[in-house]
Amino acid sequence: MEVLQVDGRINRKKLAISILIPVIGGSITGWIANKNAQEKYKKLKQPSFSPPGAVFPIVWTALYATMGIAKYRVDQKMKNMRNGSSPAGPLYDLQLGLNFLWSFLFFRWGLRGTALLEISLMLACIALTAYEFQQVDKTAGVLMIPYVGWVTFALGLNYAVWKLNK
C-alpha cells in the first residue's frame, strides 16, 4: 500500500505505534468515559440526524487509524528533512488529548455545554494539525480531512443535544 510508504519504505514498528496510540487510547478513553453513561445518554432528546450508537466505534476506530497513519507519515518525513522543525507534532498531541477529554466532558460528567466549547477548540486544533501535516506531507494532510469532517458533524450533534436538553 503506497499510502503506508514514505520515500519508498515502511517502518512497520513506527507505523504500528503511530496507529495503536490513538486507536488503543481512544478505545480505553471511550470505555472509561462511557461506562455507565450510556443509559443516561439514551434518555436525552436526540436530534433527527443523530446516527445509531453502533456507528460511533466503527467511525472512530477508522479515524484513529487514519490519523495514526498521517502522524507516521509526518514523523518519517520530518526525520528525513534537514530542518525537521514543525508545530505538527505538538498540535497533533494537543488535538488528540482534547479528543480524549471530550468523551469525559460529554458522557461521563454530562457537561455538554463545556464539551461544546471544548470540541470547538478541538476542531480548530485538528484543522491546524491538518494544515501543518499538509505542509510536511500532502498525503498526511489529505488523510486528516475525514477527521475534520466527522468532528464538524460531532460539533453539530453536540450543539443539538445540548440545546434540546438544557
Image (spheres, rainbow, N blue to C red):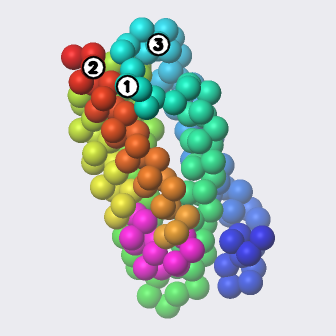
- Within 10 angstroms of label 1, few (less than 14), some, or many (20 or more) residues? some
Q: Is residue 9 magenta?
A: no
Residue at the spot 33% in from the left edge and 18% down from the top edge: 110
Q: At label 3, which amino acid type do we have?
A: Lys
Image location of residue 117, percent across then percent down: 24, 38
Q: Position of residue 27 (x, y in %)?
A: 60, 34
Question: Is 13 situated left or right of 166 in this image?
Answer: right
Check the picture and name the quadrant holding the C terminus. top left
Q: Is residue 117 visible?
A: yes
**Count of picture labels:** 3
Which residue in the structure is indicated by mark 1? 47
- What residue is shown at x 34% (from left), y 51% (from top)? 123
Q: Are marks 2 and 1 in contact (CB under 8 Å)?
A: yes
Mark earlier in primary sequence (2, 3): 3
Q: Which image quarter holds the N terminus? A: bottom right
Q: Could you tell whether 17 is left or right of 118 in the image?
A: right
Q: Quadrant of residue 47?
A: top left
The CA span between labels 2 and 3 is 13 Å
The residue stretch that appears in magenta: 129-140
Residues under numbered marks 2 and 3 in contact, where contact means CB atoms less than 8 Å apart? no
Q: Earlier in the sequence, mark 2 or mark 1?
A: 1
Of helix, strand and loop, which mostly describes the magenta segment?
A: helix
Instruction: Return the mark for residue 42.
Output: 3
